[in-house]
Amino acid sequence: MLNLRAGLIMIVSMAFFAVEDMFIKFVTRDIPLGEVMILFALTCSVIFGVAAELRGQSAFDRRLWSKPFIYRNIGETFGTMFYISAVVYSPLSIASAVAQSMPLIITIGAATILGETVGWRRWTAIIIGMIGVMMTINPFGAGFVPASLFAVLGAIGLSVRDLATRALPPSLPTLPLAAWGFFAVIPAGVMLLLATGEPLVMPSASGAWLFVAMLATGLVGYLALIFATRTGDAAAVTPFRYSRIVFAMLIGVIVFDERPDAIALAGAALIAATGLYTLAREARFKRASLAPSPEL
């Protein structure tokens, strides 16, 4: 029952994240993307930093300052910058589907960087999943949107973040890590402002309300994600992350009049299927490694 409850909460979390992406697309019509990222990151870093201090978890814990922590924040900076750029400048359905290739990219990194064992079945799934990414973006199709490539770069950056997180001590509290993760997005916003040459603006009343809605849905989604991962087993809960593709597709079609073609839909299905298979194989491998050896 705990896993079922956690899975349902994970689905709710993914729904809120998809709605947050919708608000990002709306709010950036009124406020430059770089400014939105700076305001959002600063607000969230303060909220989680204060929450950490109230729980006696210092955001300046010496255990945080390590190479994995630095790599984690670098991955957060560039991963978030590219993913949000893809959300704003390309179809939401495409950006969200490509981002779900992260488990495949993480597996590649775990094998090549962390030295984890990856069998031929998972390598086959990775290759098929990458074909799915190409089908979803469809760079040779008439409807190709070059900005959708930002989603690939975003998935790589966020995978670096998650790989670096694996190398951190499990005893590190979540709230300070979250606070610094959001803080790491501020440089991304600055870089986008410099790259686009857009000036800072005073939001209109409607833009301010859209920003508040984006902030609220993002925070609810993040808190639901934390609750889900802490309540249920990772192997049982993580697959529900792929529900985000469904929510993003629905929002894209209903709100933004997006029309993913059959190739893109098939590619998204391949990404989800191979990602789920990779997660299942990884969970099975972990269970086997933890199982006690038979006595001789």
Image: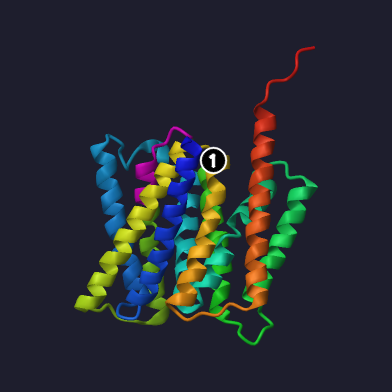
Measured as percent of width and height from the top left, residue 55 is found at 27, 36
- Decide which of 153, 126 is in the foreground and name it: 126
For the record, the magenta segment spans 170-180
179 drawn magenta: yes
Above or below, comparing residue 61 to residue 37 in the picture = above
Quadrant where the image shows the C terminus: top right
Give the residue at x 57% y 66%: 97
Q: How is the image coloured?
A: rainbow
Q: Which residue is mark 1?
A: 234
Return the residue found at the far left.
205
Return the residue found at the far bottom.
142
Helix, strand or loop for the magenta stretch, by majority: helix
Examine the rendering and report whether any part of residue 273 can be seen: yes
Measured as percent of width and height from the top left, residue 107 is found at 65, 50
Return the residue found at the far top.
296
Measured as percent of width and height from the top left, residue 22 is found at 40, 70
97 relative to 254 in the view: left or right: right
- Decide which of 83, 8 is in the foreground and name it: 8
Measured as percent of width and height from the top left, residue 106 is found at 61, 52
Question: In the picture, residue 30 is in which quadrant?
Answer: bottom left
- Decide which of 77, 263 is in the foreground and name it: 263
99 relative to 113 in the view: left or right: left
Give the residue at x 64% y 39%: 283
Give the residue at x 52% y 53%: 241
